[in-house]
Amino acid sequence: MAGHNKWSKVKRAKAVTDSRRGKVFSRLSRDITLAAKAGGGDAEANARLRTLVLKAREANMPADNVDRAIKKGTGELPGVTYEEITYEGYGPGGVAFVVKVTTDNKQRAAQNIRSTFAHCGGNLASNGAVAFQFLHAGQFLVATGKTTEDALLEIALDAGADDVIASADGLEVRCNLHAFDKVAHALEKNGIKPDSAEVAYIPVNTVPVTDVAIAKNLAKLHDTLEELDDVQQVFSNEEMDDAISAAADR
């Protein structure tokens, strides 16, 4: 399930079904529009936009969709005005959640998020009640075999990254938010294609989950939040072993 396990989240994202592909395109379009609005429509001069355009290509998003999203961001085409909002809450078992939203209707988004938490046995929290349990940072995941730890360490640190963490699945690069674009460009320049590149909320404190019923409710909350049109990203801090995680997805 998509939870604290960053690599499980990546694998799950790659297995997206055709029925959810439209949602993936919608999310990318909104992100591309916001990136173009903030840094301009030239992907070569806008590292954040360049990263998103590469993601769109990997998702087989039509080039016309990408072009329209960019032009909406630069004002060349009319489009809705999006607002980025972060919601914090608690799920079953006291698991902390951070939900990133991009919406053209703040009231609708808030109502949907609140009702989803309530329906799945959780509740929204006030701003700051949950975020302190996470590190807000840039995160790049590079699967085993794509490069060596020494090579990635040199490239990432030279670009301003804070740390490179090795695990059985691969290498994780963490950086300050302001260094994200520079690190992304350095990896691209050196031919290293991350499996995931995002500004993430990385758990500092985790909540052990050993009860299958709670794990299933957490999986339901994750899935229901992910299906909401306005939701871009969902982060949480549950800690569970493979058996409990597998049972939750059944």
Image (tube, helix red, strand yellow):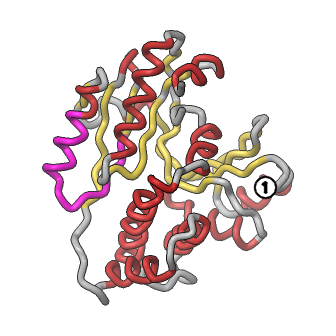
What is the magenta range?
99-115
Q: Which residue in the rendered view is the most extreme toward the top?
A: 211
Location of mark 1 (residue): 152
Helix, strand or loop for disc 1: helix
What residue do we see at 50% from left, 56% from top? 18
Residue 242 part of the magenta segment: no
Residue 109 part of the magenta segment: yes
- In the picture, measured across the screen, residue 110 lies left or right of residue 93, that is left
Q: Which residue in the rendered view is the most extreme toward the left?
A: 107
Name above or below for residue 35 compared with residue 142: below
Name above or below for residue 112 compared with residue 82: above
Where does residue 84 sit, x and y in percent of width and height?
Answer: 29, 57
Where does residue 170 sit, x and y in percent of width and height?
Answer: 76, 43
Q: Which residue in the rendered view is the most extreme toward the front?
A: 19
Name above or below for residue 86 compared with residue 122: below
What residue do we see at 79% from left, 55% from top? 152
Q: What kind of residue is marked 1?
A: Leu
Where does residue 188 sit, x and y in percent of width and height?
Answer: 70, 69
Where does residue 245 sit, x and y in percent of width and height?
Answer: 58, 23
Q: Quadrant of residue 75?
A: bottom left
What residue do we see at 24% from left, 77% from top? 79
- In the picture, measured across the screen, residue 17 lies left or right of residue 27, that is right
Neighbours of disc 1 within 10 Å: few (<14), some (14-19), many (20+)? many
Quadrant the C terminus occupies:
top right
What residue do we see at 21% from left, 35% from top? 114
